[in-house]
Image (cartoon, grey):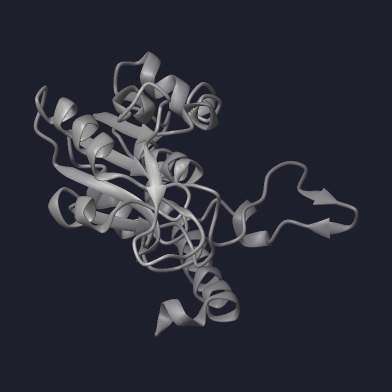
């Protein structure tokens, strides 16, 4: 998979992709991540990529021309399955969206900044708009990092045990059950006997029950 990210703050994306699973995914040749500085396509020598809003109001808006040049330059090299805009008013990211996007070969992501991007770019180029939550950040860069991580870990071969992703929270619409490791007793608190029994059918039943209980307590909206 290849992911191209357009941003005015590429520095914010340096660390997330140089460590842990995203680093390994790239080293294995399973994932390519390319970050593009939008100011390379600025309208003048001062690096301008934004301007004031028509109609007045606080905050600058990212202009059409630089974004158009950046997008068209990337599209000239390959066909993109989706062009994603990270924005607070997009569809809230969930595991099903990550699963779907992980099946594509080429994704482009546009990171908003200031008051966002000119609506005409959204109308002409953007195929999907995604929010990582009901709050506002300084820009879309950290949202893009979250999305890349969620997608990248699902690519076959990235995780050491590919079945691990199948038991994550939200994969089956439930939160994951509690997990335990050694020692079997810590501060007088014992690991549930069923997990030490070696009876895999009982263990799976216990995990399903705990997942349902935890979801009902913490995220009853998922059950609805």
Residue 183's quadrant in the figure?
top right
Q: Quadrant of residue 81?
A: top left
| Left or right: 65 as drawn, with respect to 205 | left
* Place of residue 117 in the rendered image (x, y in percent of width and height, measured from the top left): 34, 51
Q: Is residue 26 above or below residue 108?
A: above
Rendered residue at 37%/37% (across/down):
49
Q: Is residue 182 left or right of residue 36?
A: right
**Against 111, is 161 above or below?**
above
Task: Look at the picture and state if 222 lies above or below 56.
Answer: below
Quadrant of residue 171 within the rendered picture: bottom left
Q: Is residue 140 left or right of residue 83?
A: right
Residue at position x 53%, y 67% from top? 206
Q: With respect to residue 37, does 184 lie above or below?
A: below
Q: Residue at x 30, y 59 (%)?
A: 96
Give coordinates of residue 75: x percent, y percent.
12, 30
Residue 6, position in %: x, y?
A: 34, 34
| Closer to us: 86 or 201 | 86
């Amino acid at each position: 998979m290849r992911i191209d990210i357009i941003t005015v703050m590429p520095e914010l994306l340096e660390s997330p992709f140089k460590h842990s699973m995203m680093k390994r995914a790239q080293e294995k040749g399973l994932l390519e991540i390319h970050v593009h500085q939008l100011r390379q396509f600025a309208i003048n020598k001062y690096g301008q990529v934004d301007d004031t809003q028509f109609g007045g109001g606080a905050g600058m808006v990212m202009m059409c021309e630089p974004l158009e040049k950046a997008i068209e330059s990337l599209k000239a090299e390959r066909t993109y399955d989706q062009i994603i805009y990270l924005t607070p008013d997009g569809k809230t990211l969930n595991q099903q969206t990550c699963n779907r996007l992980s099946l594509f070969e080429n994704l482009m992501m546009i990171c908003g900044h200031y008051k966002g991007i000119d609506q005409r770019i959204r109308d002409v180029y953007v195929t999907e708009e995604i929010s990582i939550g009901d709050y506002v950040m300084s820009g879309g860069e950290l949202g893009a990092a979250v999305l890349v991580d969620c997608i990248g870990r699902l690519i076959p071969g990235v995780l050491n045990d590919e079945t691990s992703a199948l038991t994550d929270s939200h994969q089956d619409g439930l939160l994951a059950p509690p997990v335990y490791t050694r020692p079997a007793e810590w501060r007088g608190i014992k690991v549930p006997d069923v997990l030490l029994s070696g009876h895999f059918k009982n263990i799976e039943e216990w995990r399903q029950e705990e997942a349902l209980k935890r979801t009902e307590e913490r995220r009853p909206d998922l059950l609805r």
